[in-house]
Amino acid sequence: MNKAELAQRVADKVGITKAQAEKALEAFTDIATAEMKAGGEVVLTGFGTFSARARKGREGINPRNPQEKIEIPTVVVAKFKAGKNLKDALKGKGGSVKAEAPVAEETTEAASE
């Protein structure tokens, strides 16, 4: 599933337009990226944790010249650790990571009463 397909599925599930879902996904990725760049992590309880960590530099072999050693520098990489609910859902032990959220129309009706 790509970003456009995800936005459409979110829009259908929540009852918003695809453009609104795309805007929300863009905001999430911007915020998550900024948080990880600052050294923090993004925790979605039950789903998982996004974080950044440094992969230690090491000595490697030049693929163009296998006799030559090269220095591979330290680099910061994104890391994702799956949460318990996601792991259980993938193993077939649970149906969903989170219970169904109310549809937008229901929320709007309740707010107007």
Image: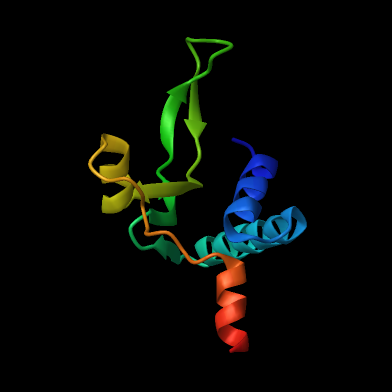
Left or right of 91? Residue 32 is: right
Q: Give the image quarter of residue 6.
A: top right
Q: Residue furthest right?
A: 19
Q: Residue at x 58, y 85 (%)?
A: 111
Left or right of 38? Residue 5 is: right
Q: How is the image coloured?
A: rainbow
Left or right of 84? Residue 112 is: right
> Looking at the picture, does residue 20 appear above or below residue 108?
above
> Looking at the picture, does residue 41 appear above or below residue 67?
below
Q: Nearer the viewer, residue 52 or 26?
A: 26
Residue 36, given in percent of the width and then of the height, sits at 51, 61
Q: Quadrant of the N terminus?
A: top right
Q: Nearer the viewer, residue 12 or 68?
A: 12
Left or right of 93? Residue 110 is: right
Q: Nearer the viewer, residue 20 or 74?
A: 20
Residue 103, given in percent of the width and then of the height, sits at 55, 64
Residue 24, given in percent of the width and then of the height, sits at 66, 62
Residue 15, given in percent of the width and then of the height, sits at 64, 60
Q: Residue at x 65, y 54 (%)?
A: 11
Q: Residue at x 66, y 64 (%)?
A: 27
Report how many numbered discs are placed on residues in the image.
0
Q: Quadrant of the C terminus?
A: bottom right
Q: Residue furthest left?
A: 93
